[in-house]
Structure formats: structure tokens, C-alpha cells
Amino acid sequence: MTGSILRVGLATPLLRLFDYRCPDHGDGPLTPGRGRRVIVPFGKKTRIGLIVAITDTSSVPAAKLRTAIRIIDDEPLFDESIMALLEWSANYYRHALGEVIATALPGLLRKGGAIDATELIWQAAEQGRNLDITALSKRASVQARIVELILKAADGADATLLSAAGKTWRTAATKLVDKGLLTMTERRITVAPARDDTDGQRTDTPPTLTEDQRTAIDSITAANGYTAFLLEGVTGSGKTEVYLHCIERELEQGRQSLLLVPEIGLTPQLVDRFRRRLSTDIAVLHSGLNDTERLVAWRKARDGSAGVIIGTRSAIFTPIPKPGLIIIDEEHDTSLKQQDGFRYSARDLAVWRAHQLDIPIVLGSATPSFESLENVNAGRYSKLSLPNRPGNARQPVVKLIDLRHQPSKDGLTEPLREAISRHLNDDGQVLLYLNRRGFAPSMMCTDCGQLVECRRCDARLVFHQHRGRLVCHHCGAEHAVPRECAECHAPDLLPVGQGTERLEQALTELFAEHRIIRIDRDTTRRKGEIERRLELVRSGEARILLGTQMLTKGHDFPNVTMVGIIDADQGLFGTDFRSSERLAQSFIQVSGRAGRGERPGEVYIQTLFPDHPLLTTLVAEGYGPFATAAMVERQSAGWPPFSYLALTRAEAVRRQDAFMFLEEARDLAAQLIATGRFAGVRWLGPASAPMERRSGRYRGQLLIQAETRGQMQRFLGTWRPALDDLKSARKTRWSVDIDPTELF
Ligand code: ADP
Ligand code: ZN
């Protein structure tokens, strides 16, 4: 590459790149090149960016062009295929390339750390082993503690470990090194491999495949180059088994596989299952890792030593030198779409990446998104089906409980209570789903009917009994429970409605002899808590499991024989055009937790609307027929996947600031469309967001709709950069969400 100007991506919201003169090698001999990091001056500070191109010319006048400070890497961090993916994503989502790069980089590298990062390790020099700690302890207690820590650490101690010895540990450690008691060495950062009882040996013998599984595996492994498969398999039908076989084939050919899973689906059990079956190193990438762990996993993927990469959303950007297969599990899951900042869909990018790498991709789900179903209908994806559970496991029987005729106490009707007792007496486990945390979703004045609302949001405060507080689930505000109604000053406020906390209390009274486990955001805040609770369920110790959305995904509880959906009616009349799709997906997913083992399962759904077509179709015919019917409606209304959307959101403390911007953005769109150059594009709004005020800010939105992706992209290419130049753009916080999955 020749040229003397570096074009650099920096993590700023600006949609452009930044030009710098090459550093004059005064500080380090590294040569610049695409994909390497560089330190550059930015305002009065310095920043780390990625070199995207090297050119001869710049539109910045020579006198204003600043010189980069130092090149960090002597090799590109990303291969060309990832560079292309990053550039394509930035362009498609109209997002700053520098921020896209920042999303793709492990934190340590983002902060300037070396890719071959080393750390300092302190170990006992030979004499140290016999060191008498008591001799040190009086005058040098920090030194004594260091020695103690080091004697316990088999592979030497790092800075994090030694810092436990006290604030002055570094000086103390240096003294011990000077005395010849300790040695200090540098080593490449590693993390202890995850505990693995198998010594790298596979211990699980795969089950005999069903005919459907065999057909699916054969089709996927026979794919020559890019092919997209939709693997539609009912819950517990053995999709994971299909993934394992396909991944094994890739390993035999020396190729790596990338498996993307929803955040909550990435459990230690899933990873263990893969470890027990595959003889390869597995790189696991998820948000719970610290920076070092993440870098190490990323490096194992990038240098080809990990045959399988399992990760959440952002793992789609992991470099993989020997790519063979990409799999998206639970492809309908909303966590695959990032909901702030760089709002990308990992599923859509995965399809793009598979295409670019010319390798097959498998999208698996029991409840496929309408987008993917439409891709099957249009012949872009091939469909593979697993309509049955293997062995004796059957799909559960679903029954509706009519809340109009069955009074409920604390959310439980008589038939539901009876069913729970019956399953408990038969040694089954029971799972109850209520997607509302807290004790009661609102507090009402018994005199005037007034509900307690958040002062900063258009929302009711939720009563949390355990904390004894009213909490806003939107802005996080917490208040003491008021002594009287703010409106009429009557002293009687009553918690109304059901939350998981109240349900747990009621169950504890009714089924005192059984252990009950609640899983929601409130009970699983501590690290490792969700795993601990799930383990109590898996071991059979807990007999009743209740919780929110967190329970619906991916978990395999072989002894759960009954599922109860406490309140089917939340979301039955949602405003978003996707609400019925979402509702059906969570019903099917939660129902799918029942009867995965040998025993048949039962599902009870409590509803005030047992005749609602969504419920009746789902119950009588299942997800497929429901989706077919709902997609006909979707098509006639012209919503995605039968059109393409870009949602502009704006929020400001003063309502008019947000709306001024949205109106100017709309006028700009109207002008462009009036030129006749953008056929198929129209706008809707601006309008208030469904919850207009949140955290004290007013929120509005403007929707752009196009008949095809191409039309949308052409329009955005002109319209989106022009938004930056609107005067009102500086007075409000705004963003453009391409292919939004939520309309608020
Ligand atoms: P899914 O990913 O579709 O939920 P899994 O692959 O986890 O399904 O399979 C569900 C359960 O059925 C697991 O316990 C798995 O071991 C078992 N299983 C999968 N395939 C078979 C098979 N062919 N024969 C017997 N059991 C199987
Ligand atoms: Zn609030």
C-alpha cells in the first residue's frame, strides 16, 4: 500500500472517517496498513482508531491535517472478510464505521492493549518456598500476605490476585523480588481453561438419529457453498443434535463453525454439552466475560485453534480463518438485534457473512420469525423440518382456562391449582409463567381509584413488597409507598394485579411442602445466581418453578410435566404489528418446556378471551398454521417482511425540540419523495412514541417505509446524511433504526 495519508475509523457518532498524516516512524518502526490500530490526536486528547485505507489525497487542507502518533499493530487485526463485513454493516445501518469497529473489537484491544497481551506474574524463587512467613509478619505484613497468596497459587500470581494483599502490594512485591524471594516474569495472557472433566475426550454418545434429523444433517452437509436453511423443529425435537453433527463434519474437514445463540440461551449446560461431544477447543463469547477472558476467546477463534465459536450477538464479528458453517439458534429471538447505539441484526449480518464466505448457514427455531418464513416462501431459504420429538416424548396437550367463569385468587384459578397439585403428586415439576416482575403492577387508591404513576414516565409504579418500595420499570425510579392517595388523601392504597413476587407468595402458602424457585430479573441479579437456581430445578430439588420471559428460552427441564401461563392477555391486544407474532412465540416456547422427557406434558393457559383467534389457532393447530394466517394479515397491511422500515426516534426534555427535528426530517423526506426519484418510499408520522414520556424526556418517532430493501437504501443514502445538517438535530437526542424490531 502506498500513500501517506491514513484514513481512520474513530468511535464517534460522525458518519465519516478521519484523515491523518502517517507518523514519521519517530516512535516505533511499524508500518501502517489497513486493519491495524493507530493512536491519533483528536481535539486536545488522543484516540485509538483503525486504519481503513491509505491514500494520497485528503479533502482536509494540508495545513489542517494532523499527524498520527503511533501505529499499534504489526499485523491487521481483522482479515479482509471481516473488514468487508464491518464496512458493509456501517453502510447498511448508516452508522459510523468507527463505532461499528468498536463493537467488533474486544475491549482490551479497543483500549489499546496488544493483541499478544502479556501480563506480569510473580512466583516464588526457590528460597521462597521455605520462607517463614511469621518472620516477616510483624514489620512487613503486606509482604507476608503476598508470600501467602503466592504459595497458594500454583501457576504464579497475577496483579489482580496480589492486589488483595493491600494497597502497597506493588512496592512490597518489588522488595521481595529484590531480596531474591520472588521472581517476576512476563507471560502471554491466558485464562485457565474451563473446567473439563473429560480431558478433551468425548464422553457423550450421540443418540441414534431420527429420520428427520438424518435428512436435515444430510442436506446441510451436502450444501456446496452458500445455502441458507431454515431448520423449523418443534421444541425438544433435537435441533441441537443436528447442529452437533454438522459441526462434527466441519471439524473433520478442519473447518470452524460459528454458533450464535440468544443472550439467555448461552448457559454453562449448553457449552458443556458441546464440550462433551466435540473434541476441539471451544471459544465462548458472551457479555459476562471480563476483558481478558474475551480477548483470549477471540484470539482462539482468530488463530484457528478453536473449532467452534459459541457466542451471543456481537460474536458475528469474530474473525474465523477456516470458516465452514454458521448456525443461528432461536433465530426469532429479539436479543439478536441490538437495541441501542449500533442497531444491527446479528441474524441478518450472519446471512450476509455466510453469503460472502460462500458457506452454508442454518437458522434454527421452533417458532421462526415471519422474515425467515417469507424467505422460505420466496425460495431464498430451504426449509428443513423436525415435526416430532424423538423417542416417546410428545408435544404437550394445551388447555384454556376461561377466567370469565373461573374466579382467581392471587392469579391462580381452581383448575390451575388442582392441576399443579396433581402434577406434584405424580412427582412432576411445574413451571409457571408470568411475564411481570414485582408484587403487583400497580397501586390503587381504594377510595377514588387513582393509580400511582411515575413522575418522570407515562407509566404506573410497580409495587415490590420485598424491597417495600414502588419502582418504575422504565426509568428505575424508586419511591417509598405513599401513606395516602396524592389525589384524594384517602389512606388506603391497595396493590392490584399479579406479579411474580405475589405469585410466589401465594404458591408458598398453597404448596408449603414443596421447594419453589422464582427466576426473574430481581432474583438473579447476582452473578451465577441464575445458574444456581436453574441447577436446583434440574436436580429435582425445586418442584415449582416460576418466572418471567427468562424461563421461556432454550432450557431443557426433563421433569417438567406441566406449564401454566398465568395471564395470556397481556399483549393480546398490543399496538405493535409484531405483538401477535411475539406472543405466539413466547407461548410456544414456554409450553415447549413441558414434557420433554418420557412423561407427557400439559399446558394450561388462563385467559379472559378463550375465543380470541390467535389463541384458538395456536391451541388447535400450532405455530405453523398460526403463522400462515397471521402472515396473510401482515401482507395485506403491508408491514414487514412485506415492506422495509426505518424508524427515526427523537427525545428531548422539551417536547417541541423532539418534534421540531422530526418534522424537519419529515419535510426533507417529503421533498425528496416529491422529486420522483424515490418510488416506493413513503413516510408515517411524526407521532408520539407509545410511551410518550420516559425518564423525564418526551419521545416521538417518524417511520419511513419502502417496498424493497434497495429502495430503502437508495433513499437513506440521500436522506440520512442530510439529517445531520438539520439545525434542530443538535437540540434533541435522535437515532435512525434500520429494520427495527420494536416500534417504540
Ligand atoms: P432442541 O434443540 O430442538 O430443543 P435437543 O437437541 O436439545 O432439541 O434435544 C432435546 C432432547 O432430546 C435432548 O435431551 C436430546 O439429548 C434428546 N435427543 C435429541 N435427538 C435425539 C434422538 N435422535 N434420539 C433420542 N433422543 C434425542
Ligand atoms: Zn419512570
Image: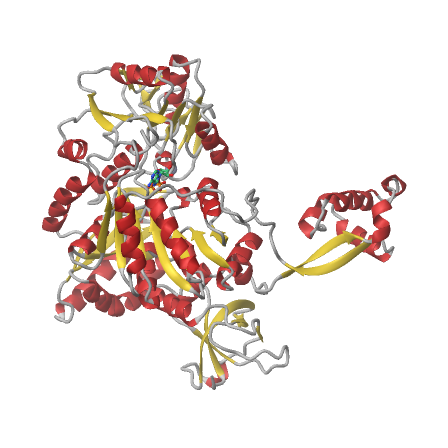
On the question of residue 680 being in view, the answer is: yes
Percent position (x, y) of residue 273? 45, 43
> Residue farthest to the right?
135
Of residues 365 and 39, the one drawn nearer to the viewer in this rendering: 365
Classify residue 340 as left or right of residue 609.
right
> Residue farthest to the left?
636
Quadrant in which residue 712 is drawn: bottom left
Task: Reply above or below: 241 against 472.
Answer: below
Classify residue 108 as left or right of residue 599.
right
Point 41% across, 23% down: residue: 482
Quadrant in which residue 227 is drawn: bottom left
Q: Quadrant of ligand 1?
A: top left
Task: Reply above or below: 548 against 150.
Answer: above
Percent position (x, y) of residue 727? 32, 64
Task: Reply above or below: 502 against 272.
Answer: above
Point 33% across, 19% down: residue: 423
